[in-house]
Structure formats: C-alpha cells, structure tokens
Image: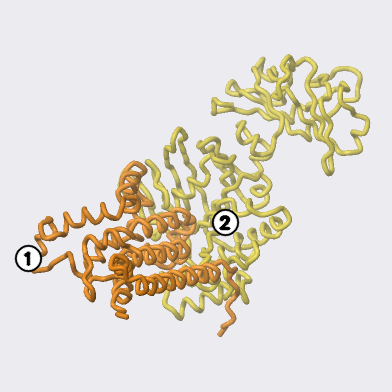
Chain colours: A yellow, B orange
Amino acid sequence: MSIYVRIKKALGDFTLDAEFEAENEIMALLGASGCGKSMTLKCIAGVAKPDEGVIVVNGVTLFDSKRRINLSPQKRRVGLLFQNYALFPNMTVERNIMAALSPRCGKTEARERFHALAEKFYINGLENHYPANLSGGQQQRVALARIMASAPSIIMLDEPLSALDSYLRWQLEEELARILDDFSGTTLYVSHSRDEVYRICDRVCVIDDGKFERPRSITELFESPDSLASALLSGCKNYSRVERKDERLVHAIDWNVYLACDRPVGSDISHIGVRAHYVGISHEACDGENVFPCSVIRVTDDIFSTIINVRPTDSNSAEDFSRIRVELPKDETTEIREGDVLRVKINPRDIMLLTCSNPRN
Amino acid sequence: MDWFPLYNSLRVASISTFITFFVGIFAAYYIARTPKALKGVLDCALTLPMVLPPTVVGFFLLKTIGPFGPVGSMALELWGFRMIMTWYSAIFATTIVTFPLMYRTARGAFESFDETLSYSAQTLGLSGTFIFWRIMMPNCKQGILAGTVLAFARALGEYGATTMVTGYIPGRTATISTTVYQLWREGNDSLAYKWVGVNLAISFIVLVSVNMLENRYNRPRRARTDTP
C-alpha cells in the first residue's frame, strides 16, 4: 500500500467523506466541480486539516486524529501541482527550482541537481526567465520540475490541464503523461474530465458530492459503471429511474417503457443508463424486444455525428428527464426531421444497471 | 533661514515610518489570518486613529504619556525620562496617526495574495520565514510600498497630535508644519511661504518617486541578460 486515506471534513452543509487507497499507480479522483476533490488534496498535503481520520503515505502516518499526529506540510514530502502552477512570480525559473532544492541539499549539490532537472524537463535556456514570460507549457514543466526537486514520495495534480485551451491541452497532456510515467511513486490526478482520466490514469475513484466510491479500473468505469454518479461521469447521457418488474425486466419510469436486460436485476437498482451512441433506430416494421416509438424533438449536427433528441411517445412527462439522446453517424440521419416518429431500439446488453446512494438525484 | 524644522520633520517622519512599517506589516499579517469576529473588532481599533481628529489622538496621548499620565509618570519616576515636549514626542504622535495607513494597505495586499503560492511553498518544504520574506513580501511589494510612502507623507505633514505633545520650541521641537503655523501667527508671511515651498517640494518628490517605482514594477518582467 502506497497511500491510504480515510478522512472526514465538514465544510458548511457539505461533508467530505473520503476513503481510498492507491498503489504506485496513477489514480484519478473524478468528480463534478465542488465535490471535494481539491479539498482532499489539500488535506493530504497538510495545508487543510481534516476533522478526523487517517492519512498514511508509504508507511508514514501524516495525519491521525486519534493518535494526534498532524505533520506539517513541510515534513510530508507530498508534491502538489496547482491548476495555476503557483510558480513564484518574483523569482526566475532557476530560483523557483533552487528554492525547492535548498531545504534538502547544499549549494553545489543543488546546482548539479538543478542542471539535471533543467535537462530532463526541457527548460534549458529558460533559467533566467520570470514565470510571466513563459508559455503555459513551459510553466507546467517548470512547476513539475520544481515538485520533483523537492523529492516527493507522492505527487498530486489538481486539474492540471483545465485552465488551458484545447489545442495546448493536447500537447501538455502528452508531456504530462510522459513525465508521470517516469515517476515511480503514487500519482493522484484530480480531474472533472473523463477523457483526460481515460487516457492518463490507471484507476479511478469517483466522488459524488463529497462521498468517495470504491476505486476501480478505468475500463470498469467506462464499460460497466455501477452507480449513477460514475455513469454520469463516464459520459453516459441517458438515464431513467426504474422499477424492477422481474428478474430481467424493468420499467423505466421517466421513459415509461419496459426494457429487458441481459443480466439479473438486483433489488438495489434504482436507475438504468444507456450511452447515446448505443441507442439504435430500428427500421423493421414490427415491435421487437426493447423497441419503442419516440418522437423527434430536436436534431443537432455535431462534427462527426448527428445528435437526435427524442421522447418516448408513451412517456407522460414533458420534462427533460424523459428525453433520450441518440448519436448516429452523419450519413444515417439525413432524412430525420423534428416531429418524426422513430422506432428506437436499445440492446439489452447495453443497459447499465445503476445504484444511487445520493438521495438528491 | 534656520533649517532645523526640515531636519526635525525628516527625522521624526523617518523614525515613525520605520516603526510603523514593521508594526503595521506584522499587525496586517496576523489580522488577515484571525477569525472573522475578532478581526472586525481589531480592525476597528487599529483603524480608529485614521478617522479620529488628530487633536483627539493628541489628547489621549497627553493623558497617557504626559507627566501625570500612567505611562508618562512611570517613565519619569523610573528613568527620569520625559515623554512630552521633546523632539521625540512627535514620534509617538506620528506613529499612531500613520499606523492605520500602513496597516490597511498592507492588509489589503496580504488579502489579495494568492494563497496557492504559500501552499505550494509549504509542500515544497520551505519554512514560514522564507515564505514570508521571500515570497509574500516581494509579491505584496506594491501595496507595502504604497503604504510606506503614504505613512511617510502623512508623518511629514502631521500637525494636530504633534503640536499637542511637542508644543513649539524653536530649534528643539519645531517641525515644518508647526513652524508654518507659528510663522502665520507672527504674520511672517515671507518665511511662511518659504516653508510652504519646501513642503511642496518634498511632497512633489515623494509622489514622483512613488509613480516611478510603480511604473517600474508594473512593467512586465524581462529575462535577465546577466547570464553567467
């Protein structure tokens, strides 16, 4: 075990309740804004104090409310990369990095290590620049080099790419992935972007309104999410409350249709989810299994696909919940117009059976 | 023309600005971190000298450090140290009057300081002293500099509280502002004009130097070219 966290912290009417462990891997903390991701990192780094709990990194107890252990951030050896990189604006690149080296080694050694880091992070030639004169990519490299200079036993990244525009983001993401691959310890990667997490991380911990779900592998999250929160974060657009009818049949309340599933439906299942690109359109005349009529509300052109919003004709609610989003390749959709009635087909194996622990949803 | 008032004014203003600089910054630093309720009370108490008439400040000072005041009588008895009617009495008055200027501008600067800089410095293992002197202070330089200059300018022009605790003794406690008043009372307009001119010149120099400093810091930083 490389990191173990079990903490609680009340912030107004919001409670952070974190529990997870991670090995030497890249673990994503994925959640919507304001779900407590950043606060968790601050608690681990020691710049915020949890109300109670335990934080252990590589066998060292950083925080334990029962044993009254609370190491100062300086002693924790936790590297934390902020979204804005937090480079010291009054210092040159060299002095920024040397500042992180100075508490640990003498002047000559610090100089040697600085040159090695400058080499590794491609910041040669930028030594005498101030952060304000660096591009976003350069700033990120300097910030990472500075964190590595402090010899952390774990590194934590707080939405490192979300302040960037999409083109730069791609470049930086690749660089970041390369740097993280070189790091042998645990990396905690906080993000609200499922794409980033999918490409960069090994495992993921979904956070829903301050509550941590159990960590799981990336493939598990994207292929078979089991909670509503993880389905939403993995990008599932269609979901409905359900009522279990029998072993393999559910009544989707929001859509007012009966759907067959290929797996047994547990009694704790409260929602189902279907990804937009798994919803098909049936051209056969007769009603088959999981085929039901829907009227087209809106057709939107996306770059490579067409998004069709439909509402099951039997649904009695006019609310947005009853909408189903269908994504089809462009050439299949030329004749669909608003107001048409289509036969929508959902394959039983594409239905995700979801639980919901959060009563608000 | 006797230049003593100029010398005395500069001496008093420099010393009180020096004191105010440190006390104001440390008060600002700690009060920016106190819980809200306490912060409100302390903030009011420390800002009071700014809104009170200087004569009220002078009155309180006389009642405290005067020969019959609790502090003044003690100093006189224990060390034979007279706290009023000397040149350094003005330092007590100007320090109190200028303190809120320094304190408030420094606090504003500290409150707008990006906390993540301090957080990341802590996780990098840097000590609190390093963070304060090498990261916080340089990044709050603008506000602190502005506060210092304002405090100095105010100290130079202080009249009400100063005149109450120092009186006007030519060659001993006279400052520019008390001298101008005295000269006007004596009807010595020509000399009064000279001192007014001196005062204008000093104020002008102070303001120009503030502007120049601000422009220098506002300019985007360039890479240093003194690469070894």
Q: Which mark is residue B78?
A: 1
* Mark 1 residue crowding within 10 angstroms, few (<14) / some (14–19) / many (20+): few
Q: In the picture, which quadrant includes the C terminus of chain B?
A: bottom right
Identify the image quadrant of residue B106: bottom left
Q: Secondary structure at mark 1?
A: helix
Tell me the residue at 42%/57% (across/down).
B105
Residue at image point 53% right, 35% down: A209
The residue located at (91%, 22%) in the rendering is A284
**Horizontally, is A52 left or right of A308 in the view?**
left
Q: Chain of mark 2?
A: A
Q: Chain of mark 1?
A: B
Residue at the far front in the pictured view:
B187
- The residue beneath circle 2 is A84
> Can residue B122 be spotted in the picture?
yes
Determine if marks 1 and 2 fall on one subunit: no
At label 1, the amino acid type is: Leu
Q: Amino acid at mark 2?
A: Asn
Image mark for residue A98: none
* Residue B119 higher or lower than B157, as above or below: above
